[in-house]
Amino acid sequence: ANAHAKAVDRASENSRPRGIVLLNELQISGFRSLREFRIALARVTLVVGANGVGKTNLYRGIELLKHAACGRLTECVARSGGMDGLL
């Protein structure tokens, strides 16, 4: 599974605390049902769709990215049932 996120640190442009990063694009490949997925992100992005199209897997991919960025990837992978549970 591959996940790539383009991020812009806009803390100096806004009133957000330093170190807060805004993602402006997310690309996920080979993660659960998301074989090739790419989305441009705004300050608020609403994801809607029919049942079974991958909304929850998108959320899980973002959660995994968050844990990786915070140094808790191993913990997150273990909670997901190991690598087999992620793929």
Image: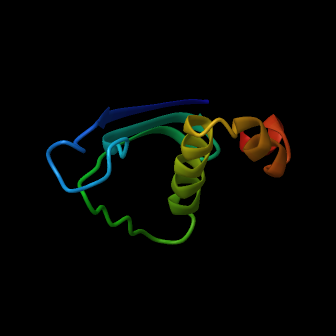
Q: Residue furthest left?
A: 13
Q: Quadrant of the C terminus?
A: top right
Q: Residue 35: x and y, percent? A: 53, 37
Q: Residue 5: x and y, percent? A: 40, 34
Marker count (numbered): 0
Please give the name of the residue rendered at 24% of the width and 57% of the height, measured from the top-left corner: 43
Please give the name of the residue rendered at 79% of the width and 50% of the height, measured from the top-left corner: 80
Q: Quadrant of the N terminus?
A: top right
Side (left or right) of 54 relative to 38: right
Q: Quick check: can you spot residue 53?
A: no
The one nearer the camera, 15 or 68, is 15
Side (left or right) of 45 relative to 29: left
Please give the name of the residue rendered at 73% of the width and 42% of the height, measured from the top-left corner: 86
Q: Residue 13: x and y, percent? A: 14, 45
The one nearer the camera, 40 or 79, is 79
The one nearer the camera, 62 or 7, is 7
Note whether 42 is above or below 28 in the view shown.
Answer: below
Note whether 72 is above or below 17 in the view shown.
Answer: above
Please give the name of the residue rendered at 32% of the width and 51% of the height, measured from the top-left corner: 17
Q: How was this image coloured?
A: rainbow
Task: Name the image quarter holding residue 11.
Answer: top left
Side (left or right) of 65 relative to 5: right
Task: Name the image quarter holding residue 30.
Answer: top right
Q: Residue 39: x and y, percent? A: 33, 45
Q: Quick check: can you spot residue 19?
A: yes
